[in-house]
Each structure stands twice: as C-alpha cells, then as structure tokens.
Image (spheres, helix red, strand yellow):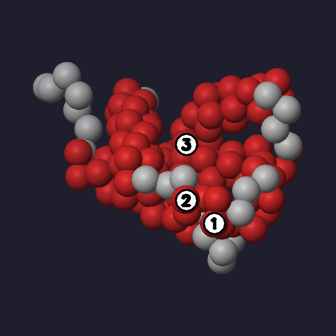
Amino acid sequence: MTFFPVNIYAVLTGAVVTFALGGLWYSSLLFAGPWMSAIGRSKEDLKAGTSPVMYVSAFLSGLVSVYVLALLMEATNVSVWWAGMVNGFLCWMGFAAATSHAHAMFSGRPLKLWTIDTGYNLTCFLANGVLLAVWR
C-alpha cells in the first residue's frame, strides 16, 4: 500500500478536464461577456494582463484540487458515479462555495461574479467526482 493510493492517470486527466472546462466556461460561448462585465474589464484588458505563468498556475491549481479530491474519494471508497458526484458536490459546497462566498461578500464583489465563478468550480467538482469514482 502506498501513502498516496490514487490513480495518477485519472488525476492528470481530471486536471486537463478542469483546465479545458475553464477555457470553455470563460469563453464567449458561455460566460466571457457577463464575467468581464462583472470584473469591470474588457477583452483587451485581459489580453494585455495575461501571461503563460497564469495558465500554468491555473493548471497546477486544478491538479492539486483533483488530487485532493482523489485522496478523499479513495478514503471514502467511492466507486460509483453518483457517489462520486455527491462527494464532488459536498467538497464544492463545504470548501469552495462557502469560503469563496464569504470572500466575495466581504470584498464587495458582485453576486453575479461569484455565481459564474462558483458555477465553474461546481461543474469541475462534479465532473471530477464522477471521473475519479469510475476510473479507479
């Protein structure tokens, strides 16, 4: 038995899924317009302030999140898709949504921005919960 008994291929795939979902979520196909409006920036502002380091950091953040979710899934012995989805939902609600909501409210960020951002997090947690449950 190893100290970190998770399927590393599933974790890496989950990190790619998380990164790809971010690209889709914040694209013009879905929420780019409302998100840019909520943060008060234009497409040109975002292009000027974006660096490769930001994308690498986003990927690594997703990798850490998926890895920790995989550890929790292993600890709770989840192996069916719906239980993976429940675990993903509970992790989102208890850790991502609750803490980010408090930060958003105290920093004066619009509820619309929090809703878009936490919707992305929820989608990632649900998708990765299913992925990690079925690909053990």
Tag nearer the camera, 3 or 2: 2
Residue 64, given in percent of the width and then of the height, sits at: 38, 36
Query: Residue beneath label 3, please?
Result: 88
Tag nearer the camera, 3 or 1: 1
Measured in 3D between alpha carbons, the distance from the residue under mark 3 to the one under mark 1, in whole angstroms, is 35 Å
Residue 31 versus residue 52 in the image, above or below: below
Residue 1 versus residue 45 in the image, above or below: above
Query: Residue beneath label 1, please?
Result: 44
Count neighbours of disc 1 (C-alpha within 10 A) and say few if under 14, some if 14 to 19, many if 20 or more: few
Does residue 95 appear left or right of residue 105 in this picture? left
Q: Earlier in the sequence, mark 3 or mark 1?
A: 1
The kind of residue tagged 2 is: Ala
Does residue 46 appear left or right of residue 10 in this picture? right
Q: Looking at this view, is 95 or 7 the one in front?
A: 95
Measured in 3D between alpha carbons, the distance from the residue under mark 3 to the one under mark 2, in whole angstroms, is 34 Å
Of helix, strand and loop, which one carries label 3?
helix
Does residue 90 appear left or right of residue 13 in this picture? right
The kind of residue tagged 3 is: Gly
Of helix, strand and loop, which one carries label 2?
helix
Residues tagged 3 and 2 counted as in contact (Cβ below 8 A) = no
Tally of numbered tags: 3
Q: Which mark is residue 98?
A: none
Q: Looking at this view, is 50 or 78 the one in front?
A: 50
Residues tagged 2 and 1 counted as in contact (Cβ below 8 A) = yes
Residue 102, given in percent of the width and then of the height, sits at: 77, 25
Residue 50 versus residue 20 in the image, above or below: above
Extreme residue in the left direction? 1
Query: Residue beneath label 2, please?
Result: 48
Give residue 3's quadrant in the image.
Answer: top left
Residues tagged 3 and 1 counted as in contact (Cβ below 8 A) = no
Q: Looking at this view, is 86 or 22 the one in front?
A: 22
Residue 90, given in percent of the width and then of the height, sits at: 62, 35
